[in-house]
Image (cartoon, rainbow, N blue to C red):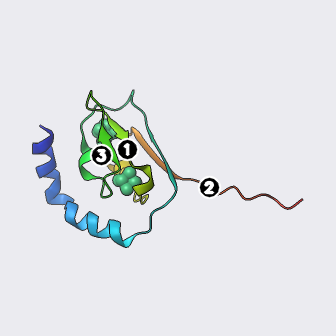
Amino acid sequence: MVKERESQLAVHHPVEALEGKATAKRKKDVRIDIYKAWCKACGICVAFCPSHVFSTDEQGFPQVAHPEACINCGWCEMHCPDFAISVQEKRSRVKKPE
Ligand code: SF4
Ligand code: SF4
């Protein structure tokens, strides 16, 4: 089912093109949250993340395996059919002058 879905989506979102983009972009310090209660384990985010950030747990749900590889492209957040992923760039903590 996921394989079939992957091949359908690949027509519109070639992974090769995204991977090219991934190498061109700089990696960013990001926070990735997956709301498991909303996720249906469809595998889209796992299959199409250009930086291979996700793996799956024993139940097939995505988990953030390589957060350091995320380039904050927003693909997973935009394409998750259940709005179950949030990706935010971490803010650097800059101390205010006293
Ligand atoms: S795309 Fe969304 S619903 Fe599908 S596995 Fe990823 S987080 Fe879950
Ligand atoms: S924003 Fe999502 S799709 Fe893009 S690199 Fe990060 S985890 Fe992968």
Instruction: Look at the image and tell me whether residue 80 can be seen.
Output: no
Q: With respect to residue 33, does 68 lie above or below?
A: below
The reply, left or right, for residue 2 in relation to residue 72 is: left
Residue at label 1? 65
First along the sequence among labels 1 and 2: 1
Q: Identify residue type, mark 1.
A: Ala
Name the one closer to the observer, 40 or 27. Answer: 27
The reply, left or right, for residue 36 in relation to residue 17 is: right
Instruction: Look at the image and tell me whether residue 43 can be seen.
Output: yes
CB at mark 3 closer than 8 A to ligand 1?
A: yes
| Residue 15, x across and y down, in percent | 21, 60
Q: Nearer the viewer, mark 1 or mark 2?
A: 1
| Residue 59, x across and y down, in percent | 27, 27
Point out which mark residue 91 bears. 2
The reply, left or right, for residue 6 in relation to residue 28 is: left
Q: Identify residue type, mark 2.
A: Arg
Residue at label 3? 45
Estimate the spatial distance between the alpha carbons at disc 1 and disc 2, rounded to whole Å.
Answer: 21 Å
The crowding category of the residue bearing disc 2, from other C-alpha atoms within 10 Å (few below 14, some 14 to 19, many at least 20), is few
